[in-house]
Image (tube, coloured by chain):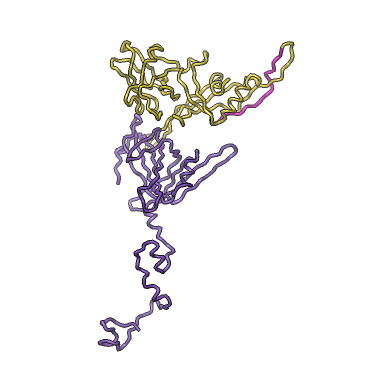
Chain colours: A purple, B yellow
Amino acid sequence: MENIPAVANSPPQVNNAEFVKITIYNEYGNTANTTVFTASSSYQDETFDSTTFLAAGGLLSVGGQQKDIRITSADTTVGLSGIPNTVISLVLDSKIRGSKLEIWRGFYNDNGILTSTAKRFTGIITSYNIEEDRQDLEDTFTVAVSASNYKTVLENRLASRRTNPESWQSFNPNDSSMTNIYSIATQTFDFGKKPKYVSGGSGGGGGTDSGGRPVLK
Amino acid sequence: MAGLQTIVDYCNGMTINRRKVVGIQITRNEIPRLSTTPTKNPWKFQLDMPSSFRYSDARQLMEALDTLDRTGYQDITFSNNACLNWIFRYQGSLSASQLAGIRVATPNGFVGTTLTLTNLPAVASSRVLFEANDLIQIGSHPYPFTSTTQVLRGTGSTVTVTTHRPNIISTSVDNSAITVGNACQFRLFCPNMPVYKLVPGGAKYAAGGTLINNALIEWSDAFELYEYVGTS
């Protein structure tokens, strides 16, 4: 369990703000080529963990972050202002899905100075939603990005791989799992059938092959 | 007439709202638990306008307000109206020329809610520089801060002022001059910009006794002015 000094011993008052960082990986396989977007609910830009979190990022809301004793799957949502269009451009013109989302809570003293931070969530953005809410003369845009934690991502197994070498090697060129698949392409198997052994095999003792292994009938 | 400044000048009631974003919970055993978010804590004013403006006199005002709409902002002050400049009047004891020499200390003269001032005048240590609720504007940034306590000159080369909100100015303010009291400017916009209704009344008589058609302006709501901190 993470220890957060700012809230130790149940202080009657805490001053805190939320900090959000989205790391967009622009190029597959190149983790150095990234675009970083930050936002916070603080009154000023703050820098920690080698990142400057912009007060003008347009943070509207941060969803709940579930914590359990056991590692469980949990999602969260971050709401960002779509005014001006920079955030809408962020989700439409970049590889936002698959980006890394991190959320911190920062704690301030009574003089408005950031004293400590605690990381609350790390996950991968799985979807986004742009909502235009127009009622009479009110016209607002909200961009919500949803993120899943790593456990949920790991549970999303790769599907739709065919039983041929090309399909498997599209993920890993050295994968030899399906190399011999063509030799049994037309065979019919009785899966679950009880094995029967050939009596009087060709080599030494009935029912075994030349290496002494049982021979299936 | 010039938009929001006119509304400030002619309002017949003003509510000042500096409340912060907070979380308040009362526990089962009635112990309060509080949290605050360190926002820019903008000034909010609610101004009630009389329905006594003649249409013929208020056309420039209406055009200015329609041009501002709900998104445009204006810098307003409480010093340009002799009937109004008692609001936010400077309560300290320094003269205008003495105040003009004061500078924000260098480096890091304004961090969090701690404003450090230097280049102070040579006056008695017991002289009051600021009383609580005195407005202080940093340089030309129209985002006033208040002093939360009385500040005396003291004997040092600097004094420290605790402001009502942290430094929301994103650029360096070191060595900036200050403006105090009702000369400070507020950058405000009106998210609810009321509309106006023309009601019978306000007729005027031209020379010779000719009746001039006219109307009185009735506002749909109070003007809720909100500090525009988007450019701070």
Q: Which residues are magenta?
A: B191-206
Residue B139, given in percent of the width and then of the height, sits at 41, 22
Which quarter of the figure is the C terminus of chain B placed in?
top left
Q: Is residue B202 magenta?
A: yes
Residue B225, given in percent of the width and then of the height, sits at 52, 27
Q: Is residue A75 magenta?
A: no
Q: Is there any visible trace of residue A74 in the rendered image?
A: no
Report whether A34 appears left or right of B156: right
Question: Compared with residue B83, is residue A90 higher up or lower down, i.e. above or below?
Answer: below
Residue B103, given in percent of the width and then of the height, sits at 36, 19
Q: Quadrant location of residue B101? A: top left
Q: Quadrant location of residue A183? A: bottom left
Report whether B17 appears left or right of B166: right
Q: How many marks?
A: 0
| Closer to the camera in the image, A80 or A85 | A85
Residue B131, given in percent of the width and then of the height, sits at 38, 17
Question: Compared with residue B156, is residue A216 higher up or lower down, i.e. above or below?
Answer: below
Which quarter of the figure is the N terminus of chain B placed in?
top right
Question: Compared with residue A154, is residue B17 higher up or lower down, i.e. above or below?
Answer: above
| Closer to the camera in the image, B202 or A83 | A83
Q: Is there any visible trace of residue B141 in the rendered image?
A: yes
